[in-house]
Image (spheres, helix red, strand yellow):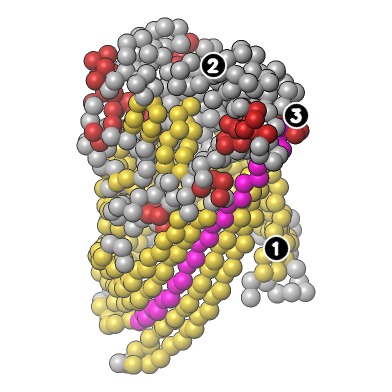
Amino acid sequence: MISALNPFNPFGFELNSATNLIQIGRRPLEGGPRRYEQQVDTQYFGTGLVGTFEGAGRTWFWDVNGMYSKNKADQTNYGSYNLYNINLALGDPSGCAAVAGCVPLDIFSGAGSITPEMLRWIQPVVRDRSQNELSLFTANLSSELFQLPGGAVSFAGGYEYRKYEGSYQPDPLTVAGRYNGVPSLPTAGSYDVNEAYLELNIPIFANSALGDKLDLNIAGRYSDYSTFGGEFTPKYGLRWQVTDEFVLRTSYAEGFRAPTIGELFGSAARADLQLSDPCSIGLGGTAPRGSAANCATLGVPAGYQQANQQISVTTGGNEQLDPERSRSFSAGFVFSPGFASDASWSDRLDLEVTFYRHHVDGAIQAINAQTQLDLCVDTLDALYCDGIGRASTGGINAFNNRLTNLGSIKTDGWDVDLFWTLPQTAFGRFKLSWQNTLVGRYEALGAAGQRQPQGPGIEVVDSAIPEWTSNAVLDWSLGNWTASWTARHISKLTEQCGDAVEFAVCFDPTVGTNRLDAITYHDAQVGYRVDWLKGLQLIAGLNNVFDKDPPICLSCSLNGYDASTYDIPGGRFWYARVDLKF
């Protein structure tokens, strides 16, 4: 509410959202950019014992290990605003005068009208704290059990205990809902897990007419979570050494992933996302994308136009989450040609090609907010609509998009990797690795079976699955010096232009799609190993050497780029660190 008595109100009457005010906006440039500072302190303590003993006519190898780590983060946010103080400064001047420090706020007079005194009243410093802890104990035992014609049957087994703890304490201003950023509440949680595993490696044959060696690997793990109970997951693998140069391998595994501390206990928070309402007429008055009948059922009047595409969406953890369960299959080969071993131009060359197929049930994700909105309008299904509320005008005034267990994800593709080690020379030793992932299929289904829009080569509101990602690393070493150069490639993507289809920024307005061009980032690093202290190495590096900006993304929220796929704009940065191993 802006009081009629506010000295900077040019209209002379009260502006109130209940009667005559739809929306008013002012970008307070006088307050400078939003700035975040974070200090993270990490503690790690680990110890272990290893040994052997003789028993039952064989040698047994054992180890026990303990570890504790703690991560504490303090985040300070500058450039945000106190909504309560803004309302007070826009209201009746007498009410403002009764509060120490309050001065009336001028949002109507253009750039420079917000004075330093006004900023001091409306611009707070917000401080949040979070902490995560992990306690770990493991015990392992291995040995050879007995001999077969193909070799010894080897055994490994063990026990592992882990305890996870996490907490988050937002600024009191955030808890009170007076902060214009993401409101959230304090939260804390913990869980522990006991696991036991057993693994057998069984040689089927060796030095046979069928090849040099064939091994069968059988493994199983039982996991008992304090939050979910127990689960057994098996794994089976075959490794066939056909010749010295050629290996075939395949595996099948079942997986179980429990929700993390953040996924279970993450505080309810708000994200202001850029969403296009299917029930709204277009910017040029074009008809809504959604069904008129369905929009009417949702309470949206004919001719409704979305006033603001930035919608407040509630996100956060969910204590009702179930674990993810998965099935994975892989098959491939390793080729290490003899002509590239101990040659004048090569010490070793390995080509690895693997086909993979994964099927995940109950994947832990928040359904894409735009997808949730579209499916609500398309289907009227309560699964999508229950979390979305609308005002009497038809506008969205509530949007719940917390984590849930989705229906399923099916994906397959190829990993193609090349590793080449060159001979030692007077100029040092060079190593080249080139790792590639090519996604052939990615299919996600919602809990009710509806196909989600994600797929290979598609960008959907801050989330992408590139068809091809590639990392090439050239390593060099000479004496105490090391260096590396890394190239990271992301193939092109396509997305829907949405309401931006009418603007020149849309790559192909005839079909309403935009193209995000392929991009390659380059990183460099150099290191020096110090002689006077064993285990000490000094390292410095530069990421995104050529300072490449990410491609513009029309469907992405707020910042116009996909931060989960690309480096941030102006993302070149340097770092230095000291590694000490003892």
Q: Position of residue 363 (x, y in %)?
A: 31, 47
Instruction: Indicate whether 176 appears above or below 194.
Output: above
Instruction: Indicate whether 11 appears above or below 183.
Output: above
Q: Nearer the viewer, residue 373 or 495?
A: 373
The answer to whether 322 appears left or right of 473 in the picture is left
Earlier along the polypeptide chain: callout 3 or callout 2? 3
Quarter-of-image position of residue 10:
top right
The answer to whether 480 appears left or right of 358 in the picture is right
**Kind of residue at disc 2:** Val
Q: Kindly state the secondary structure of the residue where label 1 is placed.
A: strand
Kindly identify the residue that appears in the image at 50 percent across and 74 percent down: 67
Residue marked by disc 3: 115
Q: Is residue 134 magenta?
A: yes
**Kind of residue at disc 3:** Thr
Q: Is residue 60 visible?
A: yes
Q: Kindly state the secondary structure of the residue where label 3 is placed.
A: loop
Q: Position of residue 86 (x, y in %)?
A: 61, 32
Query: Mark 3 or mark 2: which is in front?
Result: 3
The N terminus - image quarter:
top right
Kindly identify the residue that appears in the image at 35 percent across and 26 percent down: 390
Q: Nearer the viewer, residue 445 or 209?
A: 445
Q: Position of residue 307 (x, y in %)?
A: 46, 18
Instruction: Indicate whether 126 appears above or below 15.
Output: below
Magenta stretch? 118-143
**Kind of residue at disc 1:** Val
Query: Mark 1 or mark 2: which is in front?
Result: 2
Residue marked by disc 2: 505
Earlier along the polypeptide chain: callout 1 or callout 2? 2
Residue marked by disc 1: 578
